[in-house]
Amino acid sequence: MKTWNWKKAGLRYASLVLGGALLLPGLTAQAAAPYTASDNDTFWLLSKKFHIPVQQLIHANPKVKPRNIYAGLKLNIPSGSVKAMAAPSVTAQSVTTMAGQSLSFSKVLEVKATAYSDAPEENGWGPVDYFGNRLKLGTIAVDPRVIPFGTKVYITGYEFNGLPKGGMVATATDSGSAIKGNRIDVFIPGSRAYVNNFGFQNVKVYVLK
């Protein structure tokens, strides 16, 4: 049996103390940022969100079962050479955007979000909102009984390349027959086929003061 010569390896027993870090050949220490999972999170979606390989996420969370990620679960997002995208910072009645802007809000809603385009099939009155304004990024359709028309909101929790990363400010100026209760429809510039890739997503809506 081959034995290991600790002296030749340049290691000393005295240097190994409880709580010390031992770096094995080929491995390096890596910083990680804390992250709280939401209901729809998976390692695959998080890898796209933070631009990190899936296997790297799995290695950073050895006690987490990939198929058992639930809302509130604490995860480690490796930073390495890629800066992890920080979640919006929320303090008492204010939320800080990715750009560092602090926004005061009156309440937070958990809603189901869909998206729509300016295609004629989706807009019988033309590419305009309920008030006749041209549809643009930042327009959302709402149930005015839940979110009154004219309300400004900050939306987070979505995952789509056609929207600002991390969150966006929007205004409730449109409505739709299918938008009832805790639902919003987010206008996204682009073809109907492209916008349909948004699907259904659970998001947070901060109703701004």
Image (tube, rainbow, N blue to C red):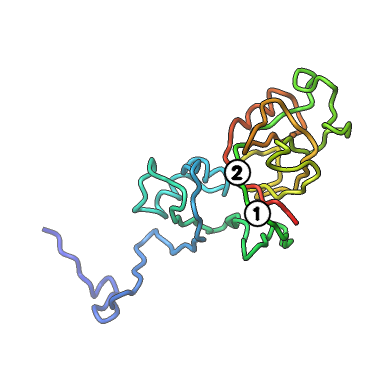
The residue that appears at 60% across and 57% down in the rendered structure is 86
Q: Determine crowd level at label 1: few under 14, some 14-19, many 20+ residues with C-alpha closer than 10 A.
A: few
Q: Position of residue 107 (x, y in %)?
A: 65, 54
Q: Are marks 2 and 1 in contact (CB under 8 Å)?
A: no
Instruction: Give the image quarter of residue 111.
Output: top right
In the picture, the disc for residue 64 is none
Q: Amino acid at mark 2?
A: Val
**Quadrant assignment for the N terminus:** bottom left
Mark 1 falls on what kind of element? strand
The residue that appears at 81% across and 44% down in the rendered structure is 150
Label 2: which residue? Answer: 203
Q: Position of residue 209 (x, y in %)?
A: 75, 57
The residue that appears at 29% across and 79% down in the rendered structure is 15
Q: Is residue 78 above or below residue 157?
A: below
Q: Position of residue 108 (x, y in %)?
A: 63, 52
Closer-to-camera residue (25/154): 154
Mark 2 falls on what kind of element? strand
The residue that appears at 33% across and 74% down in the rendered structure is 20
Instruction: Give the image quarter of residue 10.
Output: bottom left
Q: Amino acid at mark 1?
A: Lys
Residue farthest toward the front in the current orientation of the protein: 145
Distance in Å between CA atoms under marks 2 and 1:
14 Å
Q: Is residue 32 above or below residue 181?
A: below
Closer-to-camera residue (85/107): 107
Q: Is residue 171 left or right of residue 48?
A: right
Q: Nearer the viewer, mark 2 or mark 1?
A: 1
Label 1: which residue? Answer: 107
Q: Position of residue 103 (x, y in %)?
A: 73, 59
Q: Earlier in the sequence, mark 2 or mark 1?
A: 1
Q: Is residue 175 above or below residue 27?
A: above
